[in-house]
Image (cartoon, rainbow, N blue to C red):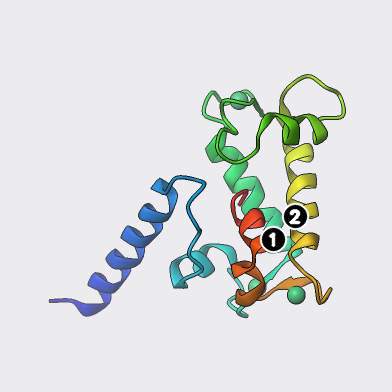
Amino acid sequence: MFPRLVLSLGLLLAAGAFVAQPASAKIKVDAALMKSLDPDNDGTVDMNEAKAAAAAEFKKLDTDNDGTLDAKELKGRLDKSAIKKADPDNDGTLDLNEYTAIVEKKFKAADPDNDGTLSEAELKSKKGQKFLKLV
Ligand SMILES: [Ca+2]
Ligand SMILES: [Ca+2]
Ligand SMILES: [Ca+2]
């Protein structure tokens, strides 16, 4: 009845489906995903957008709200060895700085043309998917 309302509802549902997906599944690079990762709407994800998305994701993952992510909270996104590597103070948890540092690394790995932004094609690549898992 209200096409625009139906459309935004559809986007919401799509976003919900994306969140509910198991982390091992391929993350679909679609309009709903780009909407959340690309707020300036230029069709690519730059480092600032990536960091903002990482911070939002961090908050979401930190279910016990203690300001760090432990292995349980990171389940399906980072395995134990990845956490260890990203955890220089070795306390078994990642704080926001440590988490952002990994996201930054994955971002750079997913940007082979080194233009500082991730295009949709780069997001769809294998390394892009690894980046998307964390944001
Ligand atoms: Ca952008
Ligand atoms: Ca926590
Ligand atoms: Ca690029």
How far apart in space, not on screen, are marks 1 and 2 (Cα)?
Answer: 7 Å
Q: Position of residue 95 (x, y in %)?
A: 73, 32
46 versus 92 height, above or below: below
Q: Position of residue 112 (x, y in %)?
A: 80, 71
Label 1: state its secondary structure: helix
Looking at the rendered structure, the kind of residue marked 2 is Lys
Compare residues 112 and 73 and report the one nearer the observer. Answer: 112
105 left or right, relative to 9: right
Q: Kindly tell me whether residue 12 is visible in this rendering.
A: yes
Q: Which residue is mark 2?
A: 106
Answer whether labels 1 and 2 touch (C-beta < 8 Å): yes
Which comes sooner in the sequence, label 1 or label 2?
A: 2
19 versus 7 height, above or below: above
Quarter of the image for the N terminus: give it: bottom left
Q: Which residue is mark 1?
A: 127
Q: Residues within 10 Å of mark 1 (few under 14, many from 20)?
A: some
The residue at the point 65 percent across, 49 percent down is: 54
Q: Position of residue 49 (x, y in %)?
A: 67, 62
Q: Position of residue 110 (x, y in %)?
A: 73, 64
